Amino acid sequence: MEKPFCPIVNAMKILGGKWKLPILFRLMSGQMRFSTLASLIPNLSRKVLSEQLKQMEKDGLVHREEFDQSPPKVEYSLTKQARKLKPILEDLCQWNKSTTNPKK
């Protein structure tokens, strides 16, 4: 017997993990360089940030743009598909505020 499809399972394959949502949240403010992004998420190692960005680029969430200059310059931004997550991330932020500061 085939199990029923759950769309959340597929979404979690793409968005799951400790760092993808914080990276997406930071990139919501616009295009940025690797070093800027790294400084905005201080507990995330540069190695893991690089790995996550590569995976997110592969999954169609992040666009990587290389500029032909010296020193090399690379900027990351959200794809159109990833920008659709903005209201969801904003709702998560609001939800977090309500759970960390519950009204008595």
Image: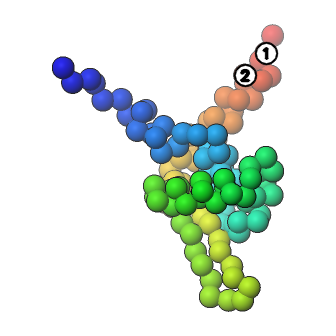
Closer-to-camera residue (18/84) = 18
Q: Residues within 10 Å of mark 1 (few under 14, many from 20)?
A: few
Picture residue at 56% right of the left edge, 69% below the top: 64
* Residue that protrudes farthest toward the left in the picture: 1
Picture residue at 30% right of the left edge, 29% below the top: 5
| Count of numbered circles in the view | 2
In this rendering, position of residue 17 left or right of residue 49 = left
Amino acid under label 1?
Lys
Disc assigned to residue 103? 1
Frontmost of labels 1 and 2 is: 2
| Residue 21 sits above or below residue 32 on the image | above
Amino acid under label 2?
Thr
Figure quadrant of the C terminus: top right
Residue 28 x %, y %: 64, 55
Closer-to-camera residue (43/37) = 43
Residue 1 x %, y %: 18, 20
On the question of residue 62 being in view, the answer is no
Residue 94 x %, y %: 69, 33
Disc assigned to residue 99? 2
| Residue 6 sits above or below residue 77 on the image | above
Question: Which type of secondary structure does the marked residue at label 1 adopt?
Answer: loop
